[in-house]
Structures are given as C-alpha cells and as structure tokens.
Image: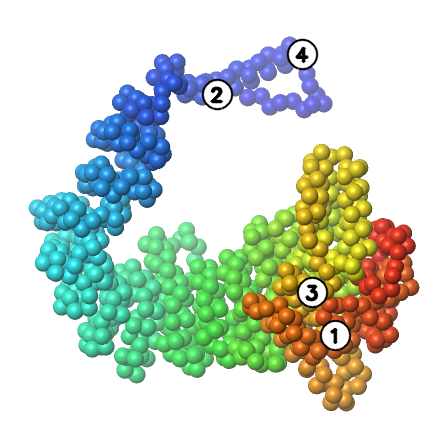
Amino acid sequence: MHPPPPAAAMDFSQNSLFGYMEDLQELTIIERPVRRSLKTPEEIERLTVDEDLSDIERAVYLLSAGQDVQGTSVIANLPFLMRQNPTETLRRVLPKVREALHVAGVEMQLTAAMSFLTILQDESVSIHAYTHSFLQVILLHLEHRDTGVSNAWLETLLSVIEVLPKETLRHEILNPLVSKAQLSQTVQSRLVSCKILGKLTNKFDAHTIKREILPLVKSLCQDVEYEVRSCMCRQLENIAQGIGTELTKSVVLPELIELSRDEGSSVRLAAFETLVNLLDIFDTDDRSQTILPLVKSFCEKSFKADESILISLSFHLGKLCHGLYGIFTPDQHLRFLEFYKKLCTLGLQQENGHNENQIPPQILEQEKKYISVRKNCAYNFPAMIVFVDPKNFHMELYSTFFCLCHDPEVPVRYTIAICFYEVSKLLNSGVYLIHKELITLLQDESLEVLDALIDHLPEILELMSTGGESSVQENKLSSLPDLIPALTAAEQRAAASLKWRTHEKLLQKYACLPHVISSDQIYYRFLQRMFTIMMTNNVLPVQKAASRTLCIFLRYNRKQEQRHEVIQKLIEQLGQGKSYWNRLRFLDTCEFIIEIFSKSFFCKYFFLPAIELTHDPVANVRMKLCYLLPKVKSTLKIPADKHLLQQLEMCVRKLLCQEKDKDVLAIVKRTVLELDRMEMSMDAFQKKFYEKDLLDQEKEREELLLLEMEQLEKEKQQNDGRPMSDKMFEKKRKEIKKSKLIRSQSFNNQAFHAKYGNLEKCASKSSTTGYTTSVSGLGKTSVLSLADDSFRTRNASSVPSSFSPNTPLPSTSRGTGNSVDPKSSGSKDTQPRKATLKSRKSNP
C-alpha cells in the first residue's frame, strides 16, 4: 500500500487519485474473508424459530430439529424451565434431552451435567421426582470416554448422593458398584468407584460399611493399577471418619502402612498425606510406634525421590509438628528441625547467576519445584516456632527466618510476609528480634510482598511498639529509626505503580500511625504527603483513602498550631480550590470529619465552608453537597446552633429557588424532604439520641484532653524540675487511652437515668476547664465545659488564658449564653471564601 501523503502536500491530480483507488481495492480484498464468514440466507433460515412458540414448545423444537449450539442453549436453560413449568419440562423436554445426550458432543455433555446439578441445588422438584427423572441419566454417562465429561457427571452424582435416601443409595448406587469395582471393568470405572465409595461411607451404619463397603475398599487398595490404588488411598480419610476409631485402626491403618511401601511414588505420596490428615484419630501409641517410623523413613528417602514428594512433605510439616508434638526424643526433635532448615534453603546453593536461556529445561523445572518447597516452608514457619518454643527462636530459627525474608524468589517472600503477623504474635516480648526483617519486607522491590505484609500492618506495628506487652508504657519503635523511611518509601513505590488497590490499602493502614509514632513525626513525614495525594492523584479510591487517613492524623495531632494549619489548608486548597475536583474532595473530607470528630469541631471549622459550596458554579459539586446535607444537619444541636440551622435553611432555600440544573434540582427536592423528616438533637441529652450523644461527648472529651496534654507538655518543658507535671502528664495520657477503650465498648440496655448518672460520675473526674470558641464577627466568647453534661456554655472567665489561641480563628460558635442576633453575624458568616484560618506562627 502507498503511504498516505502529508496533509500539507495533498495532491488531487489524476495520478494521485488512481493511487488512492488502488489502496481502496486492497482494503476491499482484505475485507472479503470477513464477508464470507457471515451466515448465508439458508443458514439463517435454518436457525430461525417461530416467535409465537412458548418456551416449552421452542425447547422441544430446537432439541428435535435445531443445530447443536441451539440444543446446548436449551439444556443450559433447563433450570429456568424447571422453575417456570416443572411438570411440562419433565414430560416433554427431558425425554428430548436424553435423546440428544446419546449423540452429544463434549460441550453439550458438560452443559447438561452443570444444569442437572443446578436443578438439584435449586430444589425445583422433590428428591423422589429428581431420582426418577435425572439419576439414571447421570449414572449412564459416568463412564464417558472423555475424562472431563466423566468427572463433570461424577461431581453431579456426588452432590446427589448427599440428599438421596438410604434405600435409593443401596439399590441404585451401592449394589451396581460391586460389579463396577471388579478388575474386569475399565480403569475409568474403577476410579469412579473409588470416589463413590468415599462418599457413601458417611451414609450407612457401621455394620453395612463393614459388610458391604470395606471389602470393596480393600480390593481397590490392592488393584493392579497404581492410579486406582492412589485414588482409593486418598479416599481412606473420608472412610476413616465414617467408620470410627476402632475400625480405622484395624482396617484402614494396615492398608495405609502397606500403601506407604508401594512401588509407585504417587501411591506412597497419597499414603503419607492421608496418614498426616488422620493423625488426630490415632492415639499416642499408634503415633509413636507406627506412624513416627513411617514419617522418619519418608523424610530420609525424600531427597532421593521425586521433588514432588518434597513439595508435599514441606507443605504438611506444620501438621506433622502439631500431630507428633511430645513424641519426638531430643535427638529426633533436633534431626527433624535440621531437616526443615535444609528444606528452607533447598536450591539456593545452586544459584550461579546464569541466564535462564542457558539453563536446560529440566534444571529450570527442578528449580521451580525447589521454589515451591521453600514457599511451603515459609507457610509452615509459625508452626515451627511453636515446635521449637518461641524462647528458642533466636538461637534455633532466626537465621532461617532471615533467609526466607531475603529469598531471591517473590513467592517465598510473599508467603513469609503473609505469616509475619503470626510470627510476631508468637514471639510476643521477643518481637524486637524481627524488626530488621519488617524493614526488609517493607522495602521489598515486589509490590505483591508489600501487599501481603500490609494486611496486618497495624497489628504488627502495635506489637512492635509495645514489645508484645499490652500494658507497656514506653514506645519501643523509637529503637527502630529505619521504620519511617521504609513506610514512606513503600507508599512512594505503590504510588508509582499501576496497582492502585495496593496503594489504597496502604493509605488505609497508615491510619494506625498515631498509635505507634509521635505526632510530630506524622506531621513532618506523612501529613503533607496525604495532601499531595489528595490534590494530584488520579484514582478516586486512593484520594478518599488519603483524605480519611489525613483526618485521623488531624484527629490525634497534639499541637494546636499544626491543627490550625491543616484546617486552613483543607479549606483554602480544597474547599476554595480552583479545580472542581478538589472541591469535591473537600466534601469527601467533610464527611470523614463528621464521622471521626465531634459535632462541635465540625461546626466550628467546616460547617460554613461546606454549605458555601451551594453557590459553586459546577453542578456536580452542588449535587454532592446536597447528598451530604443530611449529615451536615445532624451535627447541629438546638438551641445552641440555631443560627447555623438558619444559615443551612437559607442555603437550601436559595438552591430551591435559583437552581437551574434539572438533575441537581431533583436531588435538592429529595434532600429537602429528608431534612424535614430529620429530628434535631438537643443540647440536653435525649433518650432516643443517647448513644450518639454519648459517643460525641467522648470524642469531644478526647479533643479537650489533647489540648490539655499540649499545655502540660509546654509546662513540662518550662518547669522540667517539677515532679507534679510528670504525674499530671501521665494522668492525661492514660485518660486518652481510657477514653479510646470506652468508645470501643458497646452500649448496654440499662435505663436512661442510670446511664445518665454514670455519665455525671465520668464527667466529674475530668477537668472543668474548656476550650474557647470565638464567634466570627463578634467580640463575645463562649466556653464548652466538660463539667456540664449538656455542654451548655459558661462565662469565658473560667478558661485559663493558656488554653486560648494567640490568634482569633474565624469560626462558628454553638454558645448561647448571650443572646445574639443571627443576622448580626451573617455579614461574615455568609462569605467564608474570603475568611481564612490564620495559623499561629508561635506558641507561648
């Protein structure tokens, strides 16, 4: 084909036009095969069905005269027909299905097996009707020449066995099984018999099993084909659970011992795995005298045998350790531990740095099996800690743990990352031993490893910070200086990748950081990063995760100046941002603040900036605000917040009158109805709002305690020699921890007045000081007192000057101690975009 000429040099001469015609002819030739693949009119005619036919008539017609694909479609739709009209489906459609299955291909057979199973699970017909209509069809196709089809019908039959009555099982399945399990039958028939026997054992009494089933089991365990012996061996676990301990010891155990010495490796492997799974059934004598020698012999021969045996052995090591615990002699215990250590490094000695293309395929396959062995060892590492006792971890297993965390293969490191939390719990006070390995996995180059580790990152960091002791006071993460750089680097790697779900999860888990590192460390190393993500990231779930985590960082920040700076940034850069996307994120942040902070905090700083967005020029922002308005209204308390309620009503009224976007207007109308139905919370506690009010009081109490702790820290710095400051500081710190525990407990159903009395006792223990909230545009100040359960305002003179901010912050007040005309404060309250929160530049 001729390349198309540049646009600036288009030539419309005759020669050029002929060139274009040749190109079009070539395109026509390319499209010809596509046109030939379309159906001809005759084929379309054959596939066309009369639209006036009912579902049953159409199904009968298609099964009788339609194409295979149409018949398969009818069979796939059989469960729907059974639910719609079971009688006619059984009478007219099912006979046609039986006829079609006699000559059906693989796809139709697989579809029929699935449809029959679905009909059973839907319980469209009674068990009697199902047995009469479907069971014989299932049994007929069990020995289909295609293995996949045979297995599909077998899975359906095994599900049917669960619900069939005993008499039906005996006559329709067990009696024919005697002949099907004979050596004269095909291998496929005997394999099917093995699996059916494993299922039937739980359906009959011990006498019937001993007389009719166990002889067949023994016969199949001694079959001439290793496939049959292996299949029957794997069913012995189900049989043992059905026949009880005594028959298991006398019948099953001897068969397993014989099969464990079988010449076929797959049979020996099946016997070993079945023995491991049955360890709980056998008593101590059987374990020590019979099973332990078999396990010992199996381990000794495993390195000389096929690597697949090593894979199975490494996978079941944890069960072996648990089942044989207390039976090993000290020498056997040591040898078993050394065997495990050897498996943990299997294949690492052969690393030579060659290019994979230069390695023979058989060596590559062997290395893959070695990787599976080490992965299984990592999976069983917590069990091995129990095996050696956590007190001996450093001496016995630390070097092995180090190797697994630094393994060159990702699947191994991924598995040990999953187990890291279990390892931390087991080590308890010795968790400090694996600090460096935590840093290693956080810095792992594979995001899969990081994703596995962060699932339990909050719990791991809590254990690290407390040293495994729940009552410890000193934070032990101070001895781990590499933790914060590792956490920040992990977030940056996740942000630079395309795996946004890992990034989202990591940001969600970072919400635990206020409990494990200092407020200043969070402020300087993490908080600004959350802002950046909210402002620049293109993935909405990631932005929301960053927003929520930032709110939690703000919630537990210990410095008032830093809190004011964060609030100011949220309002100016998000709420008043130029990008409508940032303003949408501001509304998300408001929703999180309502959830995490007290009502008074939201009303003081975010109420007016939020409702100001009712004037936003972008319809999506106004629409999102409408959805948020009920939650905004729920933060108000009457009569303290009456002026804010008036502001809210005025904004909604303007939306109703002035909104031009029909979608927003529809949402506004629905929101107005919802707002009208809402019951307002009062300043005084109400019984119907008691739980929410008490939770809000706890939030507000924590916020006050944080302010008091900040003041105590300043006093402690100024008067370092005073012992009283230390006591008060420790007391307030304990109060914050206690308040968090109180919030986590569920409320009981005691009488309201009894609860109210408890609340008064709780409040009487707290300090009577409060924090000051200034009313924008007024020279008045109101104080929120903890001593008053209803949080009514008091005179500002009761507040120590040290608790008042140096710079007045424009905010809303819920104080009503002095009567204020709402209109008098409306001049500034209605212009929140012009008002900015001034951050304090210095602290006294």
Please say if the residues under marks 4 and 2 sit with CB atoms less than 8 Å apart: no
Mark nearer the N terminus (4 vs 2): 4
Please say if the residues under marks 2 and 1 sit with CB atoms less than 8 Å apart: no
Question: Label 4 to label 2, Cα distance in Å?
Answer: 26 Å
Instruction: Tell me which corner region of the image, top left, top right, bottom left or bottom right, holds residue 369.
Output: bottom left
Q: Is residue 782 above or below residue 177?
A: below
Residue at the image point whose x is 72% and y is 65% from the top: 684
Circle 2: element type: helix
Question: Label 4 to label 3, Cα distance in Å?
Answer: 90 Å
Mark nearer the N terminus (4 vs 3): 4
Instruction: Tell me which corner region of the image, top left, top right, bottom left or bottom right, holds residue 480.
Output: bottom right
Residue at the image point whose x is 76% and y is 77% from the top: 768
**Residue type of the residue flagged with mark 1:** Ala
Question: Label 3 to label 1, Cα distance in Å?
Answer: 14 Å
Q: Nearer the viewer, mark 4 or mark 3?
A: 3
Circle 4: element type: loop
**Residue type of the residue flagged with mark 4:** Ser
Mark nearer the N terminus (2 vs 1): 2
The residue that label 1 is drawn on is 787
Q: Nearer the viewer, mark 3 or mark 1?
A: 3
Q: Nearer the viewer, mark 2 or mark 1?
A: 1
Circle 1: element type: loop
- Closer to the camera in the image, 832 or 277: 832
Please say if the residues under marks 4 and 1 sit with CB atoms less than 8 Å apart: no
The residue that label 4 is drawn on is 13
**Residue type of the residue flagged with mark 3:** Phe
**Which mark is drawn over residue 30?**
2
Residue 158 visible in rendering:
no
Question: Label 4 to label 1, Cα distance in Å?
Answer: 95 Å
Q: Residue farthest to the left?
A: 184
